[in-house]
Every structure is written in structure tokens, then in C-alpha cells.
Amino acid sequence: MTIGVCYFPEHWPRERWERDAEQMAEAGIEYVRLAEFSWAVLEPERGVYEFDWLDEAIATLADHGLKVVLCTPTATPPKWLVDRHPEILQADPDGTPRHFGSRRHYCFNSPVYRRETRRVVSEMADRYADEDAVVGWQTDNEFGCHRTVRCYCDDCAAAFSDWLRETYDDVDDLNEKWGTTFWSQRYDSFEAVDPPRPTPAEHHPSHLLDYRRFSSDSVVDYNRVHAEILRDRDDDWFVAHNFMGDFETLDAHAVADDLDLVTWDSYPTGFVQDRRAGAPSMDELRAGDPDQVGMNHDLYRGTNDAPFWVMEQQPGDVNWPPHCPQPGEGAMRLWAHHATAHGADAVLYFRWRRCRQGQEQYHAGLRKQDGSPDRGYRDAVAAASELADVDAAHVDAPVALLHDYDDWWAIDAQPHAPEFDYWEHARTYYRALRARGVQVDLVHPETDLSDYAAVVAPSLHLADDERAAHLREFVEDGGELLLGARSGVKTPSNQLHEELAPGPFADLAGVRVDQHESYPADVDLAVETDAGSRAVSVWSEWLVPDEDTETVATHTTDLAAGTPAVTRAPTDGGSVVYCGVWPGADLADELVSGVLSRAGVATTDRLPDGVRVNERDGLTWVSNFTSDPVAVDAPDDADFRVGESSLDGFDAAVVEAAASDLSVRRSP
Amino acid sequence: MTIGVCYFPEHWPRERWERDAEQMAEAGIEYVRLAEFSWAVLEPERGVYEFDWLDEAIATLADHGLKVVLCTPTATPPKWLVDRHPEILQADPDGTPRHFGSRRHYCFNSPVYRRETRRVVSEMADRYADEDAVVGWQTDNEFGCHRTVRCYCDDCAAAFSDWLRETYDDVDDLNEKWGTTFWSQRYDSFEAVDPPRPTPAEHHPSHLLDYRRFSSDSVVDYNRVHAEILRDRDDDWFVAHNFMGDFETLDAHAVADDLDLVTWDSYPTGFVQDRRAGAPSMDELRAGDPDQVGMNHDLYRGTNDAPFWVMEQQPGDVNWPPHCPQPGEGAMRLWAHHATAHGADAVLYFRWRRCRQGQEQYHAGLRKQDGSPDRGYRDAVAAASELADVDAAHVDAPVALLHDYDDWWAIDAQPHAPEFDYWEHARTYYRALRARGVQVDLVHPETDLSDYAAVVAPSLHLADDERAAHLREFVEDGGELLLGARSGVKTPSNQLHEELAPGPFADLAGVRVDQHESYPADVDLAVETDAGSRAVSVWSEWLVPDEDTETVATHTTDLAAGTPAVTRAPTDGGSVVYCGVWPGADLADELVSGVLSRAGVATTDRLPDGVRVNERDGLTWVSNFTSDPVAVDAPDDADFRVGESSLDGFDAAVVEAAASDLSVRRSP
Amino acid sequence: MTIGVCYFPEHWPRERWERDAEQMAEAGIEYVRLAEFSWAVLEPERGVYEFDWLDEAIATLADHGLKVVLCTPTATPPKWLVDRHPEILQADPDGTPRHFGSRRHYCFNSPVYRRETRRVVSEMADRYADEDAVVGWQTDNEFGCHRTVRCYCDDCAAAFSDWLRETYDDVDDLNEKWGTTFWSQRYDSFEAVDPPRPTPAEHHPSHLLDYRRFSSDSVVDYNRVHAEILRDRDDDWFVAHNFMGDFETLDAHAVADDLDLVTWDSYPTGFVQDRRAGAPSMDELRAGDPDQVGMNHDLYRGTNDAPFWVMEQQPGDVNWPPHCPQPGEGAMRLWAHHATAHGADAVLYFRWRRCRQGQEQYHAGLRKQDGSPDRGYRDAVAAASELADVDAAHVDAPVALLHDYDDWWAIDAQPHAPEFDYWEHARTYYRALRARGVQVDLVHPETDLSDYAAVVAPSLHLADDERAAHLREFVEDGGELLLGARSGVKTPSNQLHEELAPGPFADLAGVRVDQHESYPADVDLAVETDAGSRAVSVWSEWLVPDEDTETVATHTTDLAAGTPAVTRAPTDGGSVVYCGVWPGADLADELVSGVLSRAGVATTDRLPDGVRVNERDGLTWVSNFTSDPVAVDAPDDADFRVGESSLDGFDAAVVEAAASDLSVRRSP
């Protein structure tokens, strides 16, 4: 396990580089990422390349034993290119161009931009094909950041028609699958189908879903342009991309097919403010929410079932969330441990030194702009040293949580309650699993499930018989399945199934949905289980169980009172729990615990909020995201490889023991 | 009294139609609305008509004794028409087109679109002129839905200049009436006057008002295109339009002049969420607000002083409000009774079966998408059966509530407090009348008032001498008049009157407004009447009564303390109450009760919130919009035609008695 | 000290003018402002001038001894000019024109509009050059109102390139100073730099800052066009402009260089609602916040260190804030006294009579639209009479509060917390000074400081060595300096200094900022001083004092606990307090009191909220902005020139005494 850093030598005088490299090596850093956003420096005029500075930077780092990851610089096309080809700019739905002046202003479908991308990436790949210090590449940077997956320019309009032509037999097939009889929306050619531009009322949900698929596929194709050139040059270096956290619009599963290494960028105190429901607590403002961060770790690890990297790790205070209190004491070390515990093999801090220029001046580095070490530097040195002693193979998770971007996009297009967020809903189940110390893979529903003991599927919204058969096979082989609300409602084309929900899953789950309801978040809803009353919220289904299906929870809220809310259908193999509500934490725990118990998955006692344990190859990490100290009860012979059984606030420990052999409590 | 349904056979296989017709007939349904939004199916290519399916659908329904209402399909121009004539699209104020992909994307003033409208409506009218089963037509659908009354395209700019030319003597007349000396806004030709496009500061209020009048008139003209063609073909069928609820931008009075039958679309649990101030209660989320719904009933009944229809009645859960809890048990039956009580002769549920395609998949039908009966179906069958036994003539209301769209538009342009909503303010008085079991007509101020005992005019904002004379005549004939705040402030051109408010009404009301104030809604304001302290809010006027004018309420809030807030001026005939505040419910009740008492209108005791009684031709409906049971005290000999004296939650009853002979209380 | 009024004779019949003039004279009015927004009346067609009405209006007023201030009418270009030259319209960042229909729709950089401006201003100046009654001019009206300082049209794009060419040596100089290596934002020509249009992510802060400078400079240049023509005609009349309150986008210091007289427009009950954080109290809704108003008085007085005018004084209720309760009894008199106390020599009420036309019908005048006197009239008469007896020289303030628009623009571009408003933060210190009865000049940091005893610099954000030397000189001469948070962070080009903050001020302040943090406003933060615990909020810096620097306050909030928050560095002259937090009122008072005490500035006891005392040339005004009465303790021999020692709510008094000899308390 190792540590790295993101470095921008072009922002600093060359005389400083040598000292930077020295200090990096001293800190225990192994990887240095370079050349992100550097196009205008590498090619100041079209066709005039200036690679000398990068050669020198690589050589300087290599001299100190550091390994280099290069970036293709395409996230920031230079002004000379935009001036020559303004048609490469993205456009808003109403046609307003997204102009030069920040980043990610190019359209993924622009033929001109793809040509220019091939040119600059080829130049770089050729230049460094024989450079041993360069061990890998990052394609572009954070595809889709700043809501740029979806563009509405003329190039996209044409590409969308082509995409539809490849997807459907003919336009009648499209009319049939979408259902365009509704509101006279019939098309007589693929060319007639526009991107979803401003309209008086909401868009057709099948149109929206396909535009979201097309937009994501456009990024997949664009990434492949990079990957193919880079692969063509050198077999040894890896090709990676740095994904975003809690990111809806791009199908990471699909992009990952063209990558050797999946990485993502983790900013815990920012995420908890701008992409999670609910106001963050003070502890969360200082260290983030471990389940929000962990769910991304598990998503990207699950993407190609392999160790991942954190390509950018928050190094201290950052510029983009609404507020930025200083991270808790030790938080930058904690995040590196927590990432490793989830399966990361490397954690690269972003960035080496606070930048004096431009948009990110309020973003810390490991060192301050005057060169002195910042708080993150001390944490990074500690993490580097502790992780150097730790070696662990890939995480082996007994539970799969099924996630499909198509479901996300479909529910987002018709949430039926402002509060119904697909990802938040999935996180409810994820939290319950993690609060029991269980390792979880987030995987696509078509993944081979045979090695999992239990599968949790929060919302398999779009479904067909094939998907149902895949799950049936898992259950009949003895697997335990938990199927959540809004599953099986729609066809893959986003029409309602003619059968009642859960549609293709109804026979397997032994239940039909009689009614669905949505409620404002402040309405108190509840169900009753054997264990007592349990809070639920926002979404409520009235279930009709088949004869052999057991009722696990019953609605107690006025109109629905007495109606089944959660059911369990036994099969000859495992059983299927169907949960027709958005469960509160206690109900989620009860349901998940039941599934795990039946599946024979060992768990911990329910962990305190903000404290998590993760097992990886015989080692268990304890991560304390709170400011309160905690105490770990471990078997007597368990060896603490890092830390000890008493953890301070924002502290981490690594112990040689199974997670389920530990228990953790807040210190009195 | 009868029940109907909206039906879209084109969304379903033909083999299903026969069974659908059978089931409709069994349910007691009489009317079936067809062909809404069907242009692309009726005319898949320009000039290629495919009417066979509609012929067959009509025949199938007619075979089961069902009567058909057809719709002109113009609310959804097909893509082929938009592609050929993109100039028919509406435009936002900044010129952004409102594109194809939903509905209502056409401009009412487009000459091309009027030509195409004539073509398709003529084809349909010709086709069904001799078809007995077709008893009437709905023109288009919900004119103005999705904020589409007001368009800002080039066709509208030209049409607006023409409209001004017809409205004013010459441009100097416009300059004078508007008052364009202010901020150098003088025009030297009608062509120079643009639609109100984006400007640095707010628009001239006279400009805004005339653009609102012009926009509404454009719809009136466009509707007339339909009506004339339909009338030209067949004298027997009726011409109707389905209006929206709580709808500001279109003058329903003016459209109704070209209609035989006025109908509207009633969605109680949606309206209470998205077009009413204040968070809805749980009961309101389940059944709506009876006064919000009732005010629309009375508006559309008042529009041409005749029974109306509910052309679309909410059938269960719906897709478009923020949230959709299931309606209360029986609510779909309750709404049909409540509508009938207000004067509806038919209530058509929207729609027969939940649609699998497109934007309205989350909208229930009477039957589920798998064909099984939904909750609304059971309610509809009950309502059909109960109403079949009930026959009643037109509602005869002793009280008129005066409402003028021009006043709405003018106050909306200059509310002077974000909370001052013309319609909410009017509803305060409406509620007070309805809470006393009194029938109310909502009518235009120019209506002949001689048959009314009392008139309530919440805000006759724009006024001239003619309007004042009309009211004076009513009062001098013995009528009782209640005139609310902000009356008589402006000329019909939206200039301030030179005389102080209530301007032309000042002599009649015997009062002048010394000052007006607006307050945030959370500031507690109060006045004192003989009965004690009474809460008021948002708007406050300081009144100076004439010598013979009595002070009914006096301000008690600091600065205004001691100043008259409500006055009453006796005349030789009736008297005129002027209320210079936005009254709370208690003050509104006190003022309205006084007016009714002086006018000799019999009332009930004040009814519980959410419970209403309506008298129609000797029958009185009791409607319980709450989940609590209520008990009705009726004269011993009163016959309950439907239900009985104990009503469950969301229940209705019909009793042969005058409303004022009943009293209703919550069951203990 | 005198009173005036804004008058629009063109809105009224000529037969009324004579009476108006008479009544003005009777009221004690001296100045009448005319011809604002009158272009279309003065020149109804291009080249056809109609000045007769204005001649007559001036003559009528002059006959009654009234003095006239004329306005250039350029804030409202007529429709004929817009139709002929639509290119004069401003544009939004996305290119949407800001159309005709309100005011301020012209672009400051339009060559056509500058030509037309020269033409119409020359005509007016020629016409009235020999008219004795015309004593001065107002250029245009409220430059920048309705967010119009910043325009993004093509003329501005070209002018911005020119501005950059004049500002930087060459484009490499720009690239270096801005730091365009970041995100590949390098430019290869000045033409390549666009206005900040819509972009996917945020703009480069140096780009933003320069566009803000350029936009402000464009107004300065445009104002100079007026000033030069007016100066060219007549040496006797003054040239003034009426600025806005709390106004960020225009550098009033720079505009004032071309003015003889600085004036501004004061609307206390509007400002407290729409340009101040925090909900206004009921008293503030009735009279405003004296420190919000006072800070503008002191800003504009400080602009050219001379008495200023209030060119528009709120006369009663106004149309543009969200709500408008009636001003408190006497408030219109109070505001005139308060303005005079702050250094105004004239206060002109806006407007004479409520206007019947257009956008401002809900704006009171001194008289109602029917000609009768309104509440403001009675107050104005009282103020005129009381102020006629009062004569006082220029305010002599012992304290300077340093303010630089560049700092405002830079912090606004990167607030790092939504709550961090530059002006609100500065007002915290201003309030503390005013609560001690101390007179304050708001001046530019480059102002000669040698006459001040103390200087408070809330945020000298952009700094270089020259600015540091200027402050050092002040301190070494014995001055006391208070330097607030976020000072010295950036270069004048908006890059981070390489040295830690306060950068160039670090040696002088004897302190370095180790970390900065921002917090949501609802997080309770505190520091500890010798006097106890003190609340702070939003912004927190961790300070490292130099050896000789004393710690004045220490953080007590968890992570920062024990870290210095406020320091004081003694020098051989005065001392420098550095405050690294946004202080609550108590801490601000403690810090400011310490500074004043060391500087030898006499103060009052801490004044009640909403009550202020101002000294001007030996007279002290007591202003009570609350509804509660207050009592003044004054020296026995002090003569009350206006009022007495007991003040009612919203009352004012003038006493011959030093402010620091008074104390004020709420009456029991």
C-alpha cells in the first residue's frame, strides 16, 4: 500500500523542482501524477510542442526514485483551439455555448475535438513510450465534472440520431419501445429525434433515458480514443481514469471496460456538504461521512473487481464546498487508511503545494504556498510510513449491492417525490451493511453472483425476464436476496410493465404492489415488525403477498394500516425479501441482519455512527470518523499492526483479526 | 347527474376495446371522451388521414350505449409539422423556442398553425358530423397549461401591435392611457411596442397588463377558430373546453362566450400542493381543500350561469404534484358528489386505464395498467349509481363574488408584497361564505346583479365610473355590498386614479384610503371589532370614513392603532362594507355574516373546517373532506337520498332539505 | 442645511406647476431637481427638440426663489433611438439583450451611445448655460442600478481588450500577473480575452477581478463624457451624480474624481430588507438601520472629503422592497437630521407628488397623487424649518475605515462561505465605532492618513509593499491600526501571495496566518479575551504571533482551541491589532474600544441599538431609529438647538455639545 501526490511543476520555477522531488521522496511518496490541464503549456501554438519542461520534471522525479503517472491534457482545450474551432464547445439545452474560461468546455462528440485529441495524445504517448519512470496514464480528468456529460450542441444532435439508429431496428421500433403514441410524439425518422431541449412540459421519460444513455456512451467512446492510442504505444504502462464521487451521469461500469486501473477523487468534507441529503454534523464537516466515501470506494473497486486507487485525496481544506472548516486532527491520515481498508492500493494527495494562481487558490496542498509543510503533509508522512508495512490482497466481500446507472437515470427522470434520490435510497441499505462490519461490492446486476452469499438490490427499477432469471438462479442456488422498493416497475425502455410491480420479479419475490405512495419527508410513517414499530419515510407501497409469502412488516400509518409493507418469500434455495418502503436505519438494520444471518455472513454488533471496520485479507481497519475516542474489543491474540485498541477522534488502527471478531464502542 | 371517463383506445390493442366498453357500461358510465392528443395517429403524415381506428372505437362504444365527446387534437402538433414549420413554436421572453417533446408547444397567433388547425378540425368535423354517438366536442385541451398562454415569438409581436391598433384610437391615445412619459417610454407607432422581453428593471405595469389581455384574447380567438368550424357542421353537438383550476392567465369568461358547455379539470390533491399558499395538512394531501376545488366549480358554473362538467376528475394518485399519498378511502366518490353539489351535471374521470407510455405513467386510471380495477373504479361505480338517482336543476346562489381577470393580472404585476395573491385573497372571502353553507356564484363585475341579495367584491382593483354606477344601482336597489382592499385604485389602463382609493367607489363606500401598507406574513397584525380582537395579515389600509360612515373595525397595531380598518356606509337601499385589510378567518366570518344577515340570506352555523354543505334545487349535499367522522343534524322529516346523518371520513351524503336547516359537527 | 425635492413637471398639467412651486416655497424647500428620465419629452424624434416645457418649469420655480438641479436624461434612451441602434442595448453574459421597457438599457461602452449622449447633453447644456436658476447638474441617474454596471455585449468585449492592452505591458505580462498556466488558460493576444461568459465551472478570479475593474472604469469614462461637456459650458454650476446605497459594482471613489459634488439616494426601509443580511426588526421596517444608512453617508462624504447631498430621500412608503409598512411617525424628519449629522448639506426628497403612471405608482411623494399633503410632507416641512436654523462645517472624523472596491470584488469572487460578505463584515467594525459615538470617514486605503488618530481596515485583501509601507508610516507616526481578517492574502492581480497572510502586512502586524476556516453561520464559535468569552462567526484564522506580539484573544472552539485569534503588535509608534475572525458585536466593541482608547479618541458609553449620536462642528445630533423613547444626559449648559433631552420614538435632537459628553439610554 502506498502514497502518492499530484504535482504541477509548470506552476513553479524550475529551481524549485529538485527540492520538491527530494521532499516527496523523504515523505515516503511513491507516485507522482503530472501534466493534468497542461495542454497550453505543452502546445502553446497549434503544432508547436514544448515538452522540454515535462521531460525535465519527469527526470528530476525519476532521479529520486519516484514513479510518474501522466495525464492526457484534454480536459482543458487551449484558447487558440477554441478560437479556431468554436464548434467544439458544449452547449446548454437552450443552445447557449459553454464558453472558454474554466475547464471541460469541449463536446465529447465533436469530430474536430476527437481529431485534436488524437493528435495531442499521440504526441505525448510517442514522447514517453520509452520512459521507464512513466508507469501509467490518466485519461483526461474527471469526465463529466461540472455537469458536462450531457451536451446539447449540433454535433450531439447528429450523434444522438446515429446512436438511435444503432440501438433500434428502425424508427417504428423506437416508436413502439418508447411509446410515442402518448401526446402525439411519434417520429418518422431517427433524424427527427432531437436532444431534450426546453419544452413547455416535462420530457418523455423514454426519450430522457435514451439521451442519458447516449451521453454516457459518448464519454465511453471518447475515453476509448485515449485508451487505444496509449495501449498502442506501450504494453507496460496502465491506463486509468479518475472518476468522481456520488456521480450519476456517467456509467463507470462501461468506462471501466477500457481501463486497466479504476481510480477516483475523494473529498470527504466537500461531498458531505454538496451531494448528500441532510445537514452535515460538525464531525462530518471535519472528516466526512464514512459510508458516503466508502460507498464510492466499493463502487469503483466493484467496477472491475480489482484494487483501485484514490487518484486525488483531499489534503486539507478545499475550495469548492459551501464551507470549509479545517479537517479534524489526523483526518488526512484517516482517509488514507480508510481507502486502503476498502481496497485501495495507492492514495495520491491532491496536490503537492497550494497553488497561487487561478480557481483553486483556496484548495490546500500537502505544503503551503510558501513551501512549508501543511497539516496534510504530516498526516501523509504518517500514512506513508504506516501503510508501507501493510500488504494485503484484494478485498473479498460476501455481499453484493446491485447498482445500475440506467435505474438511477430512470428514477431521476421521474422521482415522484423530490426527496426520492436513487443513490440516497441505496445508501440506506449500504449503511446498514457497513454498520454490521460487512464488506460489500457494488456491482452491476448482470455480474456473476455465484460467489456472493447475499445480494441487496435497493431498486432494480428497469427489468426484463433475463434480469429476473439471473436473480432467480442466484436465489435457487441458495442465495439470500433483498429487493427494495420501485423494483421491476419499468421495461428497459422506461415504459410501465403491463404486469404490476415488481413485474418480472413478482413471481420470484412472491408479491405484487397494489399501490404506491410518496410523502413529504416530514410526514412520520411507520411499519410494525416482530421487533416493534419502525420508522420509514417518503415512499410507501401496499403489498399483496402470494400465498406462501410471509409478511415481515405491516404498515401502521392510517390509510395503509394493516397492509403488508415488507415480505419474505422462501424458495427451495434461499429466500427473497421485498421491502416496499424507504426504511429508516432501524428497519434497514433489521432486514439486512436477517438476510446476513440466513446467508451465514458473520457480522459485528451494530457499530456506533461514524465508526467503521473493514476487513481486507486478514487485516481489519478500524476508522473513527468522529471526534470522540472509541475502544476496540479484539481477541486477545490479535496483533495491532497500526495503532492500538484505544482510538482518538479521527484515528485509525489496523489489527490482524476478522472484522466480525471485533466490537467497537465509544469510550466512556 | 352522470359519470364519464376519458379514454385513449389508441394506446391499447384493438382486441381490448370491446371489453373496455363493456366494463364502462357496467360501471354506469355515460360519457366517454376520445381523441385528445391524437393528431399524429389521425394524420401520421401531412394530408394522410387514418380515421379508421377512431371510427371503430366510436362504434364499439356506441354499441354499448356510451356517448362520445371528441377532442380536437391541436394541443400536440406532430413532429412532422414542427419540422416543416418551426415558426409555429412558442418562445420564451428571451426568444428561446419552446421545443417539441411534450405538449402545448404551438403559438396561438401563428398564421401557419391556425391554417393547420382549420384543416385538421375540419377533417374531423366532416368525418363525424353524421355520427349520432358523438354528442359534443372539447376544443384542444387545457389552453394555457404549462404557462403557455403568454408567448413572445415574432408572430406574437406582430399580433400584439395589431391588437393595440384595434384597442387604441392612435398611438398618442396609447401613450396617454398607459402614461409613457414615465422613464421616457413613449412610443411613436404601434409597431414600436414590443412584447415585454427581458429588461434591466421591471416592466411598465400598463404594458404588462395589455400584454396579458392580448395573450388571453389570442387564446379566445384561437378557440373561436375551432368553435366556428364545429358549429358549422352540426347543430346538435355541443362545443366545450376543459379549463384549468386556479388558473390566472386565461380569461375564462371571454372564452366561454364561444362555448356551449364549460368544463374544467379537477385534481384536488395536486392543487392543494402546487397552487395554494400554506403547507397542506395530511387530510388535504388525501382529499384536497373543498374551498379551493369549490371555488373553481363556482367560477366555471358562474362563467355562463349554467351547469358545468368536470371533464377530468382525479381518479386516484397523480403524477405531477410534488408528492402523492393515496387519496382517502372514498375520496374519488366524494369529489363526484361535491362537484355535482356545486352544479356539475357530469363528472368524467381521467383516465380509464393507467397509461404505460410517456409522461403520465405515474397517473392512476380507474383501472390499473393490467386491466384490474383500481381504487377509483370502485368509487366511480358507487358515484355513478348514487348520482343516477339524483336529478337537480341549476344551482341558485343568493350571493355573487365578483372576479375580473384584469384585476388579477394588474395586482399580480404589482403585488407590493410577495404574499399578496389576488386569488388567495379572494378565497378568504369565499371560504367565509362557504363556511356558512351559502351558495356563491363567481361572476364578472359587469354581470346583472339584480337577482343577488349580497355581493362580495374582494378586490375591484381597476375601476371606472361605469363600474361604480353598476354597483351603486345594486346597492340602491337594497343590495348588500362588501368591497375589499385594493379596490378602485387604478384606471382600467393601470394608472393610479387621481382621486384616492377606492377612487370611483369612494362616494358609494363613504370612505377614503389615507395610507396602505404591506407586511411580511409572519408579522402579527390585528383589528378590533365589537366582538373583540381579530387577526389580519399582509395588507393594511388606514381609512378615513365619511361623516355618515360607521367604523366596523379599528387597527390596533402600533402605528395604525386607532385608525379605522373596516367601515360600513348605509345608503337608502343596502349598505356598503369596505374592508381595508386582508382579514383572518374570524374577521372574514364576522363581516360576511353581517352582510348575509342584513341581506336576509339564511346560513348554517359555522361549519367545521373541511366540511361543507351545498344546496342545489332542494337537495343538500354534505361533503366531508376530513378523515374524521361527522354528524348531521337535519329536520326530522328530511330524507337522506344518499348516505345518512353519520358520515365517515371522506364521505358524502345527500339530503332533501335546505342547507340552512342543517348543522354539522365532528362526531365526538 | 437645507431641503429639496425631486420634481417631474412633465407628468402633470402645466396649470398645476404654479401651485406646486408655491407649495414648495412655502414648505421651505430650496432645491428642485428636474428633467431626470426626460429624454423622450425633450427630444420626441431624433433632432427635434422640445425644451419649451422645461424652460417654463424652470422659470416657474425660479419665480418662487427655488434653485434648480438639472439631470442629463441618459438613463432612459428613447425607443426611437433603440429602434435605430439596437446595438446600444446591454447584454447578459449569455448574450441576451437587455431590452427597452424599463431603464438603464444602454451600454456604457457603445460608441453610438456615447455619440448620442454628447449630442443630447450638449443641447441641454447650451440651452441652460445662461440660466441663473440652474445651479447644478446630476449626470444620468444611479449608474449601475438594476445590476447594469457589468455588460457583456460585443462593444464591451472590444473595449475590454483595449482596457487590458492599456493595463498590461503585453499579453505575456497579463498571463504572468493573472497566472494563466492554471487550467491551460493562457492567452496569445488581448483580443483572445473574452468577457466572463457562461462556462462549465467558475471563472478565473483574476479574469473576474479585471472585468469588474474594467466595467467600473467604463462607467467612470462614461460619466466623464457628461462632466466635460457640462464643465465646458458654465463654471458656476456644479456637476454631481447620485450614487446608490451599499453598492458594490461601481467604484465611487473613481467616479467622484470627475464630480464637484457627491450625492446618493437613501431609502432606509428598502435597504434594510434587500441589501442586508438578517431579517429586519419591526422598527427597522419602519425606519431602517442607522448604521446601514450611516455607512453610506460616511462613504460618500469620504469620497471627496467634503459635504455631500442626499439627492433622493425616501419620502414615505416605497415600491421596490418586498414589503412596505408605513415609516414610523417622524421618520422622514429623522432621516433628514441623520443625514445632516453625517455631513449632508442638502436633503432632497424623492418625489414631490406620487406619480400616477408607470413603475413607481407604489412610491410615495411628499404629496399624494390628488395633491393633498402626505405624511412625508409634514416631516419635510419640520425638517426644513429646523435645519434652516442649523449651520455646521464639514464633519471632522478622528477615525478612518479603509475600503477598496477591488477588495470587495475580489472577495465577492471567492467568498469561501456564502455568508462572507465584504460589506457586512466591514459594517461589523463600523457599527462598533458608531455605537461609541465616534465619527468615521470611509476612505480609500491610499488616502493620506496623517490626520487620523486611528485606522480600522476590515479587509485589505489585495495588497502590495506600497500599501504596507503606507500603513507602516501611519503606525510609526503613532497611529493605531486595526487590521481585519483576510487582509494581505492576495496580490493586486488576485493571485495568492507566496508569503503567508497577511502577506505584505505580516511584519507590520507581527503575525502569520497558519490556517483559515469558514463555517456555516449557525455554528457557534467563540474566542476568549481578558474580558471573557466572545462570540465570533463564519470566518476563523489560526494565528502565529511573532515574538513581540501579544495575543489578545484565543480560540476556544474544539480544533482551534488555544490558538491565537486576535493579536496586537506594538511598534515604536502606535500598535497594530490583527483580528483573524469575524467578530461578534461584543468582541468588535472590545477591540475598537481598545484602539480608540490607545489613540486618545473620546467616546460615549456604548449606545443602545438603533440610537446614534453624531458630532458635526460642535453640534451633536441624537437620532432615535427605534419606536422606544430615549433620554439624553447632556452637560448642564448644553443647549438643545432642536428637540430636547427626552426623545420620542423615531425622534431627533440637536444639542450644542461634544458627542462624547453625552450619554443616551432607553427611557424606563
Image (cartoon, coloured by chain):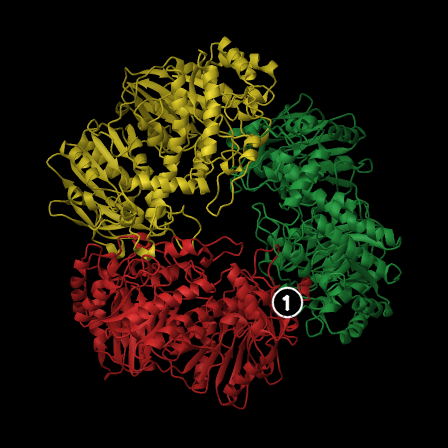
Chain colours: A green, B yellow, C red
Q: Is residue A248 left or right of residue C32?
A: right
Instruction: Indicate the quadrant containing the N terminus of chain A: top left, top right, bottom left or bottom right.
Output: bottom right
* B635 vs C646: above or below: above
Return the chain for callout 1: C
> Is the residue marked by circle 1 packed among few (<14), some (14-19), or many (20+) residues within 10 Å?
some
How many numbered marks have been drawn onto this rendered protein structure? 1
Viewport quadrant of the C terminus of chain A? bottom right
Query: Percent from the top left, x then y, of residue A511?
Result: 66, 25
Residue pushed farthest front?
C47
Q: Nearer the viewer, residue B223 or A62?
A: B223
Find numbered disc 1 in the image and state the secondary structure of the residue it sits on: loop
Where residue B396 sits: x, y (%)? 27, 23
Observer able to see residue A291: yes
In the drawing, does residue A258 fall left or right of residue C416? right
Q: Quadrant of residue A257?
A: top right
Q: Can residue B238 be seen?
A: no
Q: Nearer the viewer, residue C519 or A652?
A: C519
Would you place residue B427 above or below residue A266 in this image?
A: above
**Amino acid type of disc 1?**
Ser
Which residue has dot 1 on it?
Answer: C189
Q: Residue at x 86, y 70 (%)?
A: A63
Taking C448 as reference, is C566 left or right? right
State the image coordinates of residue B435 (x, y, percent, origin top left): 31, 32
- In the image, residue B487 lies at what x, y percent? 25, 44
**Left or right of residue A635, residue C230 in this image:** left
Residue C4 sits in quarter:
bottom left
Choose between A370 and C309: the one closer to the eye. Answer: C309
